[in-house]
Image: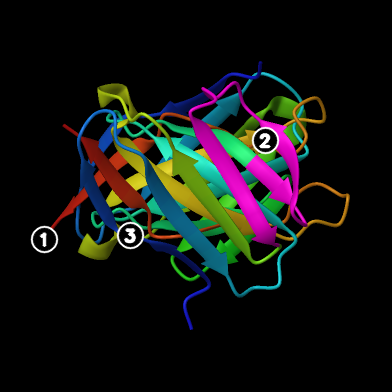
Amino acid sequence: DTAVSQTPKYLVTQMGNDKSIKCEQNLGHDTMYWYKQDSKKFLKIMFSYNNKELIINETVPNRFSPKSPDKAHLNLHINSLELGDSAVYFCASSEYTGLPNSPLHFGNGTRLTVT
Amino acid sequence: GIQVEQSPPDLILQEGANSTLRCNFSDSVNNLQWFHQNPWGQLINLFYIPSGTKQNGRLSATTVATERYSLLYISSSQTTDSGVYFCAVETTDSWGKLQFGAGTQVVVTP
């Protein structure tokens, strides 16, 4: 009965490769996000989708391409991976009613290591 | 953009002790949330508290929006309270974007 689930949990790959992370939520929320947590544990928003529509894109390199096939899924594809992409990537979701966000629910994270 | 400062950066507690974590922010907010990241990396939402006071078991939080701060109280701490506590805020200018503080690392020793 996991609310926000993302796969894989760990991802180790070489520079230059392309990889994807998948996320699914069963909370019925309209809004989904990708956050990046760096080695100092700082969390920063990357993207947000509301009902399959991109609403936030936080100056992320265009090697990162989110895709939302439906409002319960948000995937992240990364092209030409670089060493600096190593981080923990969190998917999250929240209700969206046009009012200030309701509580944010995170997935368990995907630890990406680029060698 | 808004500045979010959390203090202290690190806290070591003996089991059973009480503590207060603080979050200061530099602008008016319409959304403030507290999260706990446990030692396994999971991020758990503790409170959605843009104003007022809430309690959940041994944890409680108070946000004084007019004075731009929020406090998280941990009472009778347990080793399972260890981890990093994050405060995150959203302003009307940054609608939909939660801005996170740097966190408070808490270690509760037996």
Point 25% across, 54% down: residue: A10
Point 45% across, 49% down: residue: A90
Q: Is A64 inside the magenta-drawn segment?
A: yes
Mostly what secondary structure, the magenta segment? strand
- Please state the chain letter of the residue tagged with numbered disc 2 in the rendered image: B
Mark in the foreground, 2 or 1: 2
Mark in the foreground, 2 or 3: 3
For mark 3, what is the residue?
Answer: A8
- Write down the region rendered in magenta: A48-70
| Residue farthest toward the left in the current orientation of the protein | B110
For mark 1, what is the residue?
Answer: B110
- Please state the chain letter of the residue tagged with numbered disc 3 in the rendered image: A
Point 61% across, 49% down: residue: A67
| Left or right of residue A108: residue A93 | right
Q: Amino acid at mark 1?
A: Pro
Badge 3 density bin: few <14, some 14–19, many ≥20, Cα 10 Å: some
Can the viewer see residue B78 in this picture? no
Q: Amino acid at mark 2?
A: Lys
Badge 2 density bin: few <14, some 14–19, many ≥20, Cα 10 Å: many
| Residue B97 circle label | 2
Using the image as rendered, state which of residue A69 and residue B16 is in the foreground: A69
Position above or below: A26 against B46: below
Residue B100 placement (x, y as % from top left): 52, 33
Mark 3 lies on a secondary structure that is loop
| Left or right of residue A94: residue A22 | left
Point 42% across, 52% down: residue: A21
Residue B104 placement (x, y as % from top left): 36, 36
